[in-house]
Amino acid sequence: MTFDLPFQETMGFPTGDSGDDDADGLGYGLIGPTILLSLKAKIDCPWTDALPKDIFMEYVLNYANLNEARTNWRPLLVDALKFNESDLWLSGNANLTSTVTWVNQHLWSKLGRGPDHPIFFKSGQTPLIFDPMSIIAYGYASCTGTSILFANALRAVGIPARVAGTPAWYGNRTQGNHNWVEVYDIDHTTGGDSSDKWKFL
């Protein structure tokens, strides 16, 4: 299968002879690998089949969550996780829920400084350390950074994920802010609202 048509569509802007195809400077660096690997996940992962197009475009394809540095994290995470070589994938029993659990169980050690030195939580690191590359380099992050890295890892295996948060934990600003990850689960409902498919992790 060629990626020509979906590739052009996911670029979000004309790819013809406009003379300004790379106006933002991202077209030949970050964007290309992001789109190719996102489309590969769309083909490979059956849980993407029922995703609405807008959810896929915003929460799987997207390379950013908040205002973190824009880096080419997707090839690195795909290679580090090697999900398509995992026992879960090879068993043929992988689904959205089991894959989320698998990623959470393996991500931190696979990107850490060795099996005994996984990436760990360390409070008060944002905004110094919260983009994926900084977290991998330092080996730790606070809730904002770990949420971004976890959401990106889920996106790398075709799971729509977003970072949620509050500026005041328990409604109290003295408790500080907090971030967490939510995934879009087509089978999930909250309080009888079938339109709300976002699930807290």
Image (cartoon, rainbow, N blue to C red):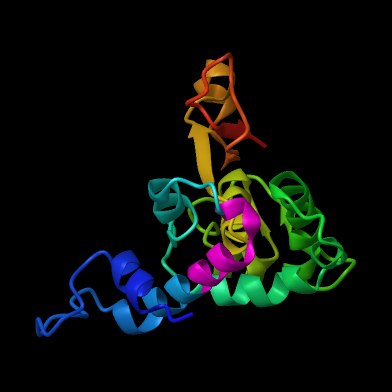
> Residue drawn 47% across and 26% down?
195
Q: Which of 54/150 is in front?
A: 54
Query: Residue 76 appears in which quarter of the rendering?
Result: bottom right
- Can you name the residue that lies furthest to the left here? 18
Q: Can residue 69 be seen in this view?
A: yes
> Residue drawn 62% across and 44% down?
143
Q: Is the magenta stretch mostly helix, strand or loop?
A: helix
Left or right of residue 100: residue 3: left
> Residue drawn 51% across and 37% down?
164
Examine the rendered structure and indicate whether residue 32 appears above or below residue 96.
Answer: below
> Residue drawn 60% across and 57% down?
149
Q: Which of 197/175 is in front?
A: 197
Q: Which of 163/193 is in front?
A: 193
Q: What stretch is highlighted in magenta?
A: 37-48
Is 38 included in the stretch rendered in magenta?
A: yes
Give x and y (percent) for residue 150: 63, 53
Total marks in image: 0
Examine the rendered structure and indicate whether residue 8 appears above or below residue 199.
Answer: below
Give x and y (percent) for residue 60: 50, 56
Query: Residue 116 appears in which quarter of the rendering?
Result: bottom right
